[in-house]
Amino acid sequence: MARLAQIVIFGASGDLTARKLVPALLRNFEEDNFRGPIQVIGVSRTEKTDAAWREELSSWIPESQKAVWERFKPLLSYKSADSADPRQIEALEGHLDSLALNAGEEPHHVGRLFYLALAPGLFAPTVEALSKQGLVACEPDAAEGWRRVVVEKPFGTDLGTAQTLNHLLYRHLREEQIFRIDHYLGKETVQNILSLRFQNAIFEPLWNRKHVESVEISVCETVAMEGKRGAYYDKAGASRDMMQNHVLQVLALIAMEPPSSMRPDAVRNEKVKVLESLRSFTPAEVHEHVVRAQYAKSDKRERDYRDEYGVAEDSRTETYLAMRALIDNWRWSGVPFLLRTGKALHKRFTEVVLRFRTPPLDLLNGPLPGDVCPLRPNDLRILVQPDEGVRLSFLVKRPGAGMVMQHSVLGFDYADLGTGPTPDAYQRLLLDAINGNPTLFIRGDEVEAAWRFVDAIRAGWEANDEPVHAYPAGSKGPAIANELFHGCEGIWSEGP
Ligand SMILES: NC(=O)c1ccc[n+]([C@@H]2O[C@H](COP(=O)([O-])OP(=O)(O)OC[C@H]3O[C@@H](n4cnc5c(N)ncnc54)[C@H](OP(=O)(O)O)[C@@H]3O)[C@@H](O)[C@H]2O)c1
């Protein structure tokens, strides 16, 4: 049995803690996933009692979990402190020590996970305050008395700020202690990309430029600027909010080489190589390969993006971004990766489509009259959300006289496994952080490589004064984005 682990959540009265972190911990408790005893300590500036914090959180717990919540609740306590103030962190240390001693453990044997569910401006000051107090010092690879820090997104707003943040963190922490989170990697279906590719012999031989004509990755959302989100989003846009992290993480898993093992750094080394092989666009290439756009009012939404709360009247922030990215490496040279993400679109879905090349000859039909595009019968779809599964399409002969072809699909749905709903991403990621497994977290060089790619695009927009196209809210995005597919290659997926 492992020693006591203390999970310290900074930002305890925030949205993320209530909606995601505490429910994820509760689910792990319910499933008996923790290797040893735990204590959860919430920290934010507002004064409140343990009971008041628990009461606040309980409104987020569904009726079906109320019984387990009653057993879990006593593990939760609250301490008010400003995370960036070393003196208040000193008081927090006293609180943590006494909780450990009450549980019969020496504080230096206890593992501590500090979760920064805070505004990004507080990441570095909080780690500095913790370090000043000696709260993050531990031996490398410590099996007990370990100290780890989970850093929320966004990690920087460009390469320079990400480098600065990395630099500040490295003054106090080793890379192995830093868990930069991208919740996309906690999704079962995203992890399934690795098992699909590397636990099956049939896909890997086809997984390269010889057989794959293009790869499409879509992260489409129907939500727009609900509530006060516009104030944050207008400074970020689709490039920073979704492309730099979620979309590029999925791309890295799709395009990486087989790792030498599933050791965290073996996997992350391969992901970094992909991100570093992404062609960094010149301004001319940005013009040719990238489309940005903003949603406009339509019968589905009564306001233009620029009229949303918190958005500048003359905003040029993109709510939609699509591109034809290129990976200049041996496996993928010349294969376009068509990437797309946006808000206020027609459907919410995340999907990867590998489109395979045409057969060398069409022996049966020949081209249809007037059809200039040869048939591309095969694609492999990985459905990430909300539908979760895999589809492989191919042609079959329609029964009857003649050789008439029709599309058919071989499918797998997670729902059919009968294992119940797939766990929330935070459930898996929190457990991995407590167990010290960083495979599904982003390494420092990885986050920088992703920013380098996105920064070049943003620089190209500036240099060219690229237009911000418009698309009706609730539509499939701007028509001009279809041109990123060259002619017969296909069109953007409409989603499941
Ligand atoms: N919410 C989400 O779904 C979501 C998704 C992805 C990423 N994130 C990231 O997660 C982080 C938190 O987001 P959130 O939505 O939960 O924010 P939030 O609702 O604004 O909560 C922020 C929390 O930080 C506390 N706080 C502020 N200053 C503090 C200080 N100096 N010391 C200690 N506590 C302090 C606030 O409470 P007091 O005022 O009482 O101190 C509050 O509890 C952000 O980095 C965000 O980008 C959130």
Image: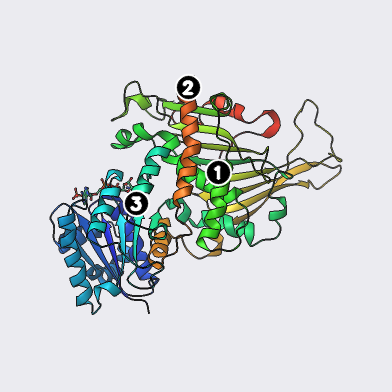
Q: Which image quadrant: the N terminus?
A: bottom left
Seen in the picture, residue 436 relative to 477 is either above or below; the reply is: below
User: Are there few (<14), some (14-19), or many (20+) residues within 10 Å of tag 2?
Assistant: few
Q: Which is closer to the viewer, label 3 or label 2? A: 3
The answer to whether residue 206 is left or right of residue 432 is right
Query: Which image quarter: residue 260?
Result: bottom right
Type of the residue with mark 1: Glu
Q: Earlier in the sequence, mark 2 or mark 1?
A: 1
Q: Residue 401: x percent and y percent?
A: 86, 44
Q: Residue 145: x percent and y percent?
A: 32, 71
Using the image as rendered, state which of residue 138 and residue 456 is in the foreground: 138
Query: Which image quarter: residue 31?
Result: bottom left
How many angstroms separate mark 2 from mark 1 (CA)? 23 Å
Residue 348 shows up from this direction: no
Q: Residue at 39% x, 74% y: name it.
A: 35
Where residue 463 is drawn, which disc sits there?
2
Where residue 328 is drawn, which disc sits there?
none
Q: Is mark 2 within 8 Å of ligand 1?
A: no
Q: Residue 450: x percent and y percent?
A: 49, 42
Seen in the picture, residue 104 relative to 177 is either above or below; the reply is: below
Seen in the picture, residue 123 relative to 295 is either above or below; the reply is: below
The answer to whether residue 112 is left or right of residue 241 is left
Q: Residue at 15% x, 56% y: name it.
A: 87
